């Protein structure tokens, strides 16, 4: 009711036929709070376990299959947006996974157009840390259904990254938020990707004497009559005998001894 525009929500869950999945929990909960829902039944579990060798990470194939199914269901339902539940910690972990193991700077943006150009993906929880969502889920008593497929795999790279980020936060509070903020303030000209910045045709700008200068003209106040010097003081004589000069560019040059006297005045 507080949104600036009207929208409808349909909760979609993919039942991947994983052993022990409590298929009754979500329908019962969504009905109890009056949220329209659609349960899609696809046995992707058998596909993943058949294709991926034992001991290898299954998450990549599983997520691709799940994403394709969600896009299809979105089209069938006439949905204009696909809202996913990734939070800030997920985005950070994905960024470091791509950086450390994929050799590229890539994360998960809050809004994304799908590769086929037919869907818009949004991540409404992108700026929220996981700990806040855990606290809210406990407060609202949301039903939690763990993924037995991912949860059963040890030594996942994502788990390693999450442990690294957690250790950072314990030793250096605020570091994770600093890295997350850096993802919103990218300077392509200070990186090395020619597809983001045209380094080849980079040229210096012609001199513009009406614009920025290497050394801006300094404005000095008039010298007071009394600098605490007398006529017999050699320094005083030198000061009076060293008038300001003008450079070829029109800038005023103040002798160093005069500058020194100005600094004494504080």
Image (cartoon, helix red, strand yellow):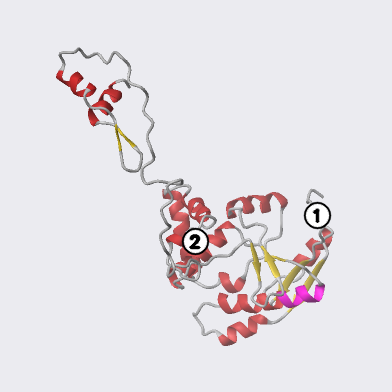
State the image coordinates of residue 181 (x, y, percent, origin top left): 52, 53
- Quarter of the rendering containing residue 59: bottom right
The local crowd at label 2, few if under 14, some if 14 to 19, many if 20 or more residues have their Cα within 10 Å, is some
In this rendering, would 35 be left or right of 213?
A: right
Q: Nearer the viewer, residue 252 or 187?
A: 252
User: Percent position (x, y) of residue 169?
Assistant: 46, 51
Q: Position of residue 80 (x, y in %)?
A: 77, 68
User: Is 198 displayed left or right of 248 in the figure?
Assistant: right
Residue 130 part of the magenta segment: no
* Residue of label 2: 162
Q: Nearer the viewer, residue 33 or 107?
A: 107
Report which quarter residue 123 is drawn in. bottom right
Which of label 1 and label 2 is nearer to you? 1
Q: Which residues are magenta?
A: 71-77
Report the residue at 83% width, 56% height from top. Answer: 6
SS of the residue under disc 2: helix
Residue located beneath label 1 in the image: 5
The image quadrant that residue 65 belongs to is: bottom right
Q: Is residue 150 above or below residue 128?
A: below
Q: Is residue 42 left or right of residue 237?
A: right
Secondary structure under the numbered disc 1 in the rendered image:
loop
Q: Is residue 76 magenta?
A: yes
Rendered residue at 41%/63% (across/down)? 203
Between the residue at mark 1 and the residue at mark 2, the CA separation in whole angstroms equals: 36 Å
Residue 42's spot in the image, x, y percent? 72, 80
Q: Main secondary structure of the magenta part?
A: helix
Residue 19 can be seen, yes or no: no
Q: Answer yes or no: is residue 245 visible.
A: yes
């Amino acid at each position: 009711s507080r949104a600036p525009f009207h929208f409808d929500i349909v909760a979609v869950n993919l039942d991947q036929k994983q052993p022990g999945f409590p298929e009754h929990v979500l329908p019962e909960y969504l009905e109890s709070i009056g949220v329209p829902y659609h349960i899609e039944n696809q046995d992707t579990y058998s596909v993943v376990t058949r294709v991926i060798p034992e001991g290898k990470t299954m998450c990549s194939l599983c997520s691709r299959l799940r994403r394709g199914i969600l896009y299809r269901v979105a089209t069938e339902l006439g949905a204009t947006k696909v809202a996913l539940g990734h939070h800030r910690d997920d985005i950070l972990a994905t960024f470091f996974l791509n950086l450390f193991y994929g050799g590229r700077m890539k994360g998960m943006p809050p809004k994304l157009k799908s590769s086929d150009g037919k869907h818009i993906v949004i991540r409404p929880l992108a700026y929220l840390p996981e700990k806040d969502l855990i606290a809210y889920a406990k407060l609202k008593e949301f039903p939690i259904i763990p993924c037995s497929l991912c949860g059963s795999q040890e030594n996942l790279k994502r788990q390693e990254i999450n442990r690294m980020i957690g250790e950072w936060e314990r030793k250096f509070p605020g570091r994770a938020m600093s890295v997350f903020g850096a993802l919103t303030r990218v300077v392509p000209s200070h990186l090395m990707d020619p597809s983001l910045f045209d380094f080849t045709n980079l040229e210096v700008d012609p001199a513009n004497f009406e614009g920025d200068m290497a050394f801006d003209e300094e404005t000095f106040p008039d010298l007071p009559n009394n600098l605490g010097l007398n006529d017999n003081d050699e320094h005083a004589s030198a000061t009076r005998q060293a008038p300001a000069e003008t450079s070829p560019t029109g800038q005023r040059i103040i002798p160093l001894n005069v500058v020194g006297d100005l600094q004494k005045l504080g």
